[in-house]
Image: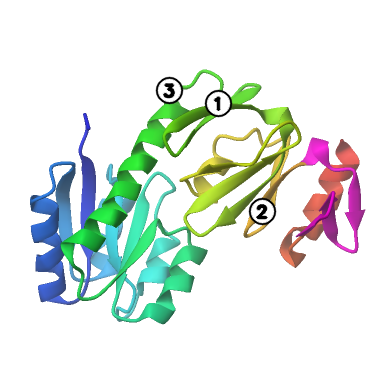
């Protein structure tokens, strides 16, 4: 990998921080930018700095990991570290790349890091693609690069750490990225996030029934917070 992933550790447990630090130092693709005992201390570095990856504890005083994750820029990915498995679902709701249970072993650490490496490669593809802001988008799907016509995408759904592109002219395509990041690359006039888990192509919509968008046998909910804006934008098409 040409460029190392720039990492930050945020954990209020000194031993946990030291363990993750030792893992980062023995991993050639990673570079440690900073290590912090609270989210408040890490805010400036993560928001203002060029940080690729945050190893973030969830259960911390004052500003917890889930709250802090909502402040993290979309260009930065998060791997949650927690002693409590029930927090994993909260992690995926804020587009975490993965989560690790304490005590973290190096094998599990590397599994999560491999996802971050794949994400970095995919982001590079998106940023370098001349099509990504025109009529095509190129995404990394496992070991393939897939070019899709933006107009053929019906809807995009999030499933844990992946997004699924559902198309009218081909099979679904699964890619390792976040919805928040994807929104930066899709033309705003054509696409809208109508729910935490769904983005729809407004030009592909033919049926709206009982507050849901209908694509064949698939019913996509429109969140209450988005209903007025959604109906307004449909009328403009």
Residue labelled with disc 3: 128
Please name the residue that numbered disc 1 is placed on.
132
Residues drawn in magenta: 202-220
Front one among 1 and 226: 1
Estimate the x, y position of residue 91 in percent, counting from the top left: 43, 67
Q: Position of residue 171 (x, y in %)?
A: 66, 38
Q: Residue at x 20, y 38 (%)?
A: 4
For image coordinates 40% across by 62% down, the residue present is: 69
Q: Can residue 44 be seen at all in this image of the molecule?
A: no
Residue found 35% across the figure and 57% down from its top: 78
Determine if the magenta segment contains residue 19: no
Q: Position of residue 175 (x, y in %)?
A: 50, 43
Q: Residue at x 50, y 51 (%)?
A: 162
Mark 1 neighbour density, 10 Å: few (under 14) some (14–19) many (20 or more): many
110 up-or-down from 142: above or below: below
Q: Quadrant of residue 192?
A: top right
Percent x, y of residue 125? 42, 28
Gap in angstroms between the C-alphas marked 3 and 2: 25 Å
Q: Residues within 10 Å of mark 2 (few under 14, many from 20)?
A: many
Quick one: SS at disc 1? loop
Name the residue that disc number 2 marks: 198
Position of 108 compared to 169: left or right? Answer: left
- The mark nearer the N terminus, 3 or 2, is 3
Q: CA distance from mark 1 to mark 2?
A: 19 Å
Asked if residue 67 is positioned above or below residue 218 in the image, the reply reads below
26 relative position to 76: left or right: left
Q: Is residue 150 above or below residue 12?
A: above
Q: Secondary structure at mark 2?
A: strand
Magenta-colored stretch includes residue 218: yes
Report, in whole angstroms, how far the alpha carbon at label 3 lies from the one at label 1.
8 Å
């Amino acid at each position: 990998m040409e460029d190392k992933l720039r990492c930050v550790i945020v954990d209020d447990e000194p031993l946990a921080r030291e363990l993750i630090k030792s893992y980062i130092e023995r991993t050639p693709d990673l570079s440690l930018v900073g290590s912090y005992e609270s989210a408040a201390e890490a805010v400036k570095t993560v928001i203002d700095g060029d940080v690729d990856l945050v190893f973030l504890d969830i259960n911390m005083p004052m500003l917890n990991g889930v709250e802090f994750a909502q402040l993290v820029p979309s260009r930065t990915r998060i791997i949650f570290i927690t002693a409590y498995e029930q927090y994993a679902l909260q992690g995926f709701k804020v587009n975490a790349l993965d989560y690790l249970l304490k005590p973290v072993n190096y094998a599990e650490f590397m599994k999560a890091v491999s996802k971050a490496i794949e994400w970095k490669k995919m982001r590079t593809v998106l940023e370098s693609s001349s099509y990504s802001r025109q009529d095509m988008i190129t995404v990394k799907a496992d070991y393939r690069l897939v070019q899709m016509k933006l107009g053929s995408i019906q809807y995009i759904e999030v499933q844990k750490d992946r997004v699924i592109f559902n198309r009218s002219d081909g099979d679904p395509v699964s890619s390792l990225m976040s919805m928040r990041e994807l929104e930066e690359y899709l033309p705003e006039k054509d696409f809208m996030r109508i729910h935490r888990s769904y983005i729809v192509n407004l030009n592909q919509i033919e049926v709206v029934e009982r507050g849901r968008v209908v694509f064949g046998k698939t019913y996509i909910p429109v969140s209450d917070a988005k209903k007025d804006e959604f109906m307004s934008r449909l009328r403009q098409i």
